[in-house]
Structure formats: C-alpha cells, structure tokens
Image: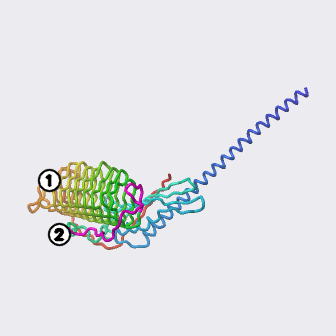
Amino acid sequence: MLKKNQGHVLIIVLLIFTISFILITALFSLSVNTRKQINISDIEMQKTNAAEMGINLFEKYLLKVIQTKNYKNVNELLQQLKDQLNPLIKSRTIDNNLSYNINKIDISSTLDSQKNTIITLVVSTQGIFKDSVKTLNKTYKLTVPNGTGESGGNSEGIFTSKSQFDSISDSNRNFPSLSPVLSGKIPNQCTSNLSNCNLNTDVYFNQSLSLTGNYTVNGNAQFNDVTMNNNSKITISKDAIFTKAVFFNPDSEINIGGNALFNESLGFKATGPKLTISGDSKFNKAVLPQGSQLTLLGNTTFGNSLELNESNLTLGKNVYFSKNVRLSTNSTIKIYGSADFTGDINVDNGSSITINGNFYSPSKYITVNGTICVYGSSDVGENGGSTTNAQIIRNVGSCGNAPATIYILNKPIQSNDNTGDLNINIDSLPVKYQ
C-alpha cells in the first residue's frame, strides 16, 4: 500500500514539473515576443518622429517665406517659395542609425471660380532607421484672394480697350530674352533617358529630350524638341523657351514658374496632360490639346490656331488669338481678363467660352452651338462686324446655358492696377502615412 502511494506521489510530482515547465516556456516565449514587439514599435515611433522632423522643418521655412516679406504679386511669391523650399530636398542624420530625408516638394498654382489664386504645396519626408523607411506626405494650400497685390503678376490688369492688345500681339517682340543667359551642352548628370534630374542652374538642353521621369530646373531653361512620355514631368522655376515641337503623352506635365515661349507646335495624345505657366506665354504655332488641362496665368498670345478637344483652358489675364479657335467635345475656355479674337470662332455643342473682361471679335465668323458668356462689353455683331448663327442676348443679369447663345452682360470693367501687398491665407491638410 505504501509503495502504491509513493507511485501516486511521484506521478503528481512529475505532472507538476511538466506543467510548470510548459508554463515557464510559454511565459519566456511571450516575454521574448513582447520584447520584439516593443522594439518594432520603438523603431516605428523613431522613424515617424524623424519623418515629422522633416515636416516641421518644411513648415518653419514655409512660414518664414510667407511672413518675412511683403509680396506685390503671385509670381514673386511663387518664385520665393521655390527658391527657399527646393534646397531643403536632402537627407539629414540624427544618429548612426537614424536619419530623415525631405525627398520631394511639389509647388503648383491654379485659379478658382472666384479668381483667387490657390498655391498647392505637397511635401514628402522619410524617417529612416538603418534600411527601414517611414514616409509621410502633407499638403498645404495658400490662398491669395483676388484683388490683392498687382493683377496676376504685373500692373497691366484687365485690358479695357482693343489697342492695349498691341503690347502682347506684336510678333516681333523679344519674348522672353534668355539667350545671353543660357549656353553650353546638357549637363553630364542629365541625359535624355535619365529618370530624375535636379538642376540648380540655368541650362540649355541642346539635345532632343524623350523624357521619362522628372526634370527640375531651378532657373531658366531652353529646350529643343521634347517628347513627354507617360507620367513624366518638367518643372522650371523661372523662364523657358521651347525652340522646337513639344509632344505630350498621357498624364505628362510641364510646370513653368516664369514666362514661356513655344516656337513650334504643341501636340497632345490621349488624356491627362497638364501645362501650367505662372507668367506670360506665347505660342507661335498650332496648339492642339486633347483631354488636357492648360493653366496660363499671365498675358497670353496664340500666334496660330487653337483647337481644344475634351480639354480645359484657363487664362489668368488677357489673351490675343491671331488665328482660328475651335472648341469641341465638351471643352471650355475660362478667361479672367479680356480677349481679342482676330480669327474665326467655332464653339461646338457642350463647349463654352467665359470672358470676365471684354470680348473683341471684329469682322470674322463666329459659329456657336455651345455658349459664350461675356461679363464686360463686346463688339460682336456691331459696326458691320461678325456673322453668327447664335442669338446674342445683351444687358442680362447673368449667363444662362441655352445652346447657340452669346450672353453679353455689359458690366463695367476696370483695369486692376492695385499695387498693394498680397493677402496670403494658409491651410494644411492632415498628414498621410505610408
């Protein structure tokens, strides 16, 4: 009987030992996993904090640009933003294992329906722990209310007489004058097939460019022929000359911070191309946008025909059209100054032209199956002038959307020569984590 009891005790002891061993092993494994999770969380926090240091540095310089100087016009503000913020694109070391990198800054501008200028800034930063990376993206929007500063970048304002178009229609004027500044060959670090190229100098690209990726020129630039491949992008902080043809493939983009001259035609394929010019622009040959967005914020001259197909054209100031203009397949032209059309105008059904200033179109043919809306005055159909199939409604309170109609509101238009300082409102969107 005693031996039997001793056997039971031994079995119980062994069972307790086994259970204890299992529990200790499980607790040890849990402790190790917890420690690993703590380490991973700590690394993630360090990377996030490092990336946020990049965001904070960007915000510091952004506020410095806005608050330390009074700007007379949007172009001056845009140039200062690019000059002060683009040099921030580089890596900074915190310790042996941890660093942060401001790897991308995009600056663009558009006009909203109230003619306010919206400047959008997108910054991307990275927190880096050894080879592990955390990316943060943040967007800022600067709103410059209409009517502050000089009008659209200089004091010309809205043209109130046809004679004022002589200043932008002269085909012999030197525009822009960059030749003395630009010389030499394309830099060694930038070739036609390079994915990304960042230049902090004026440059003359004397080779043909078939661009895949991003080019950034923090200065003036001159190009020969350029092919923008899918999703490619050129950003030029100052003036630009394109001496030969420019061809846009889907979702390609050109942004110019100053004035721009295009000596040859612009071609567009499929949908998505964008062209943004903050200063004055001149196009000497045909412009044929298809599925595209063109935003030209200064005074603009089209020296040849313009044909929009499923495209939108925004003109921030006055525009001179020397040849025919055609809008087809739900296209729009929005003009915030006055417009002089010396060629024929054809607006298909579903398309529209809106002119905030005055409308000059003497002695030419106008075919309107869509709508034209003019807030100022117009000489269309007067003085033995234009022939049109559309009805012309004058002195109305607002523009309607009846097809084959030209609305002339005849509201007084004054040249905006206000030279006060810009009012700038800043708004930031939530950080996006990747």
The residue furthest top is: 1
Instruction: Look at the image and give the residue range highlighted in magenta.
Output: 172-198
The residue that label 1 is drawn on is 391
- Residue 339 % position (x, y): 21, 62
Q: Is residue 218 visible?
A: yes
Point 60% across, 54% down: residue: 43
Q: Compared to 181, does 324 lie above or below?
A: above
**Which of the colour schemes (rainbow, by chain, secondary structure, one colour) is used?**
rainbow
**Front in this rendered view, residue 145 or 202:** 202
**Front in this rendered view, residue 218 or 372:** 218
**Front in this rendered view, residue 174 or 311:** 174
Residue count near mark 2 (Cα–Cα under 10 Å), binned few <14, some 14–19, many ≥20: few
Q: Compared to 261, does 36 lie above or below?
A: above
Q: Secondary structure at mark 1?
A: strand
Give the quadrant of residue 81. Answer: bottom left
Mark 2 or 1, closer to the camera: 2
C-alpha gap between disc 2 and disc 1: 27 Å
| 305 displayed left or right of 252 | left
Would you say residue 186 sits in the magenta stretch?
Answer: yes
Inspect the image, locate mark 2, and give the three-letter code of the amino acid beneath it: Ser
Inspect the image, locate mark 1, and give the three-letter code of the amino acid beneath it: Gln
- Residue 218 % position (x, y): 39, 65
The numbered disc on residue 163 is: 2
Q: Compared to 432, does 358 lie above or below?
A: below
Point 43% across, 64% down: residue: 86
